[in-house]
Image (cartoon, grey):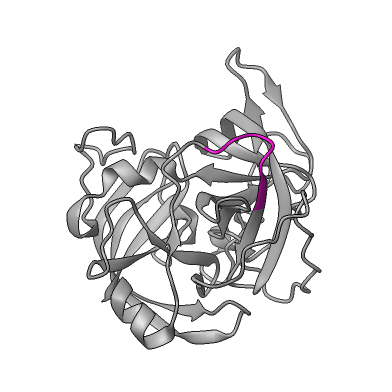
Amino acid sequence: MRKPLVSTLAAALFGAAALTGIATAPAAAAAGGETPPSLEGTVALSNCSGSVVKLKHSRPDDPALVLSNGHCLEEGMPGAGEVIVDQPTSRDFTLLNADGGDAGKVHSDKIAYATMTDTDISLYETDTTYKEIKRTYGIDALKLDAKHPRAGRDITVVSGYWKEKFGCAVDGFAHRLKEADWTWKDSLRYTMECQTKGGTSGSPVIDDRTGKVVGVNNTHNEDGEMCTLNNPCEVNEQGHVVIRYLNAYGQQTYLINPCFGRGNQLDLDARGCHLPQPRS
């Protein structure tokens, strides 16, 4: 989770956020021969990747939401246990079309939700509706899958920052994934073909079969170290720690759907919503 050009700490953070001067590597092919998703609906942030996403209850006239990582916030990374809700911001996103060309800009004045506790996500509310994005740019939002992803399914990590795709499969799930001060639950573990890099933080993880978003890319064990910055480790139900050198991971996104209702408005008290809540 590397996030440079913001602060000394951010410059060291997590191998999945943007690094200047990194050469673009060829994208891996889809693991099972399926056609990988296009870049349509992804966005480039100043330091990360993201995507315009449509939730279960989203309607065409609702303000569009942009999904990325909690550690990609320009305001700084949330601390362990911190949850950000309805925080003012001012951020632009470069919207991409299917072949990776710049379609235009979308703007957000509000961070609807962000955290690095249990998961690593940020959701920005834009000042543009899904209908307006479709009419102006011809771009459809990506749909968020409401179901838990399945092991063995072919996936593609689609980076708007690099305009690049990484194809592999879901290798399994980490009961707990620890990195420095942060702990995430039930994280997606990729097969080794997905060698993500700086700038891919926040990329949607798309199930090749359904075309729906099942996760958001967030980290990569870079040096083989144990539970340190840029070196996540897995902890199983018995507390046993496993290091998987060069393995990349993402955070599941099906948990987001129950927490947003009509008008794409956040409701952390909604039935079935299990995202962390702000401290009272």
Give the residue drawn at x 27%, y 68%: 60
Where is residue 5, by image quadrant?
A: bottom right
Q: Residue at x 68, y 61 (%)?
A: 36
Which one is in front, 91 or 165?
165
Residue 93 locus on image (x, y percent): 44, 77
Vertical side of 209 occupied by 97: above or below:
below
In the rendered image, residue 162, in percent from the top left (x then y), is placed at 65, 73
- Taking the spot 75% from the left edge, 56% from the top edge, the residue there is 30
Q: Is residue 274 above or below residue 220?
A: above
Q: Main secondary structure of the magenta part?
A: loop
Q: Which residues are magenta?
A: 149-155
Q: Is residue 141 left or right of residue 157?
A: left
Residue 197 shows up from this direction: no
Determine whether, in the image, residue 85 is placed left or right of residue 213: left
Q: Residue 196 magenta-drawn?
A: no
Instruction: Say above or below: 172 vs 215.
Output: above
If the image is split into quadrants, where does the C terminus sit? top left
Please name whichever residue, 102 or 178, is drawn nearer the observer in this view of the structure: 102
User: Could you tell me which quadrant the N terminus lies in?
Assistant: bottom right
